[in-house]
Amino acid sequence: MNTMKTFLLMGVLTVMVVMVGGAIGGQSGMLFALFFAGIMNFVSYWWSDKIVLRMYGAHELKQSEQPALFQITQELTMRAGLPMPKLYLIPGEQPNAFATGRDPQHSAVAVTEGIVQLLSRDELRGVIAHELAHIKNRDILVGTIAATFAGAISYLAHMAQWAMIFGGRSSDNEERSNPLVAIVMMIVAPIAALLVQMAISRSREFLADETGATMSGNPLSLASALKRLHTASQQIPMHATPATAHMFIVNPLHGGGVMSLFSTHPPMEERIARLEAMVYGNTTR
């Protein structure tokens, strides 16, 4: 179901690019925006792992430093048929973790000092399984594609703003373009694209929870870990950037109300309920 939602949302983004391009940028503008956004996200896809690990001061772990963490990861990768990722430790008290890398052969799992200190072995196993699920499900690739389309829509909107400022309009669309539609698209389209991108991120989190719980064989351990991580993340701040917040297993940033619409993570209560339903069943879904 979560995979189907992801493909549906990706289809919505594709349609939005076509609509926005036709309304405010024309075919040439649409193609240029897609190309430019694609180049940017291609670079991000290949080198974002090194960038984000350096950003958070992570250092690669040796097995002698965290033997239990290595043992857990090795057991899970063998069970899932995945290559062993590199393991990194991020300095900081907030318990959190994320996975990165362009494919399973070039992957890494980073954990904070806080998560190693807080969680039990079973809970930490659930968290590592969740991160390996992101690698197994190619979520970094999915996120990059979603960012490409969302970025293309934003670029088109910016191009339209400059075109209106300087009075430019492509001749092939002179008769079909509607200034009012263009203005609405410039305002609404980037926001809508961001909402869809966030929805894709939330869908992939649900899928990683499900895949990780199956991989570890104990959904309740992951549910217990998420409860503790969520509580701790509310109490212990972390110097995280909004651009990378979606990578973490729990949101390192806080925001409620309208900002919850732009959250990259599903409601924690729903994540836990779904994991518990894998064991006890769910009559309310």
Image: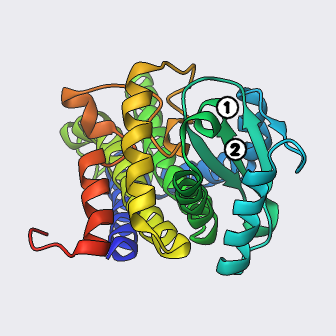
Between circles 2 and 1, the one closer to the viewer is 1
Q: Secondary structure at mark 2?
A: strand
* Amino acid of disc 1: Glu
Q: Quickly name the residue at label 2.
A: 110
Is residue 148 visible to the viewer in this orientation of the structure?
yes
Outermost residue, left side: 284
Is residue 46 visible to the viewer in this orientation of the structure?
no
| Residue at 45 percent of width and 32 percent of height | 158
Quadrant where the N terminus lies? bottom left
In the image, is residue 278 above or below residue 93?
below
Quadrant where the C terminus lies? bottom left
* Amino acid of disc 2: Ala
* Numbered circle sitting on residue 113: 1
| Residue at 49 percent of width and 56 percent of height | 146
Instruction: Name the residue nearer the viewer: 233 or 150.
Output: 233
* Numbered circle sitting on residue 178: none
Instruction: Give how far across and how far down residue 121 sits, in percent.
Output: 60, 53
Instruction: Name the residue nearer the viewer: 70 or 27.
Output: 70
Instruction: Give how far across and how far down residue 48 sits, in percent.
Output: 72, 44
Instruction: Name the residue nearer the viewer: 204 or 71.
Output: 71
Within the image, what quadrant is residue 156 found in?
Answer: top left
Within the image, what quadrant is residue 229 found in?
Answer: top left
In the image, is residue 227 above or below residue 148?
above
| Residue at 57 percent of width and 66 percent of height | 133
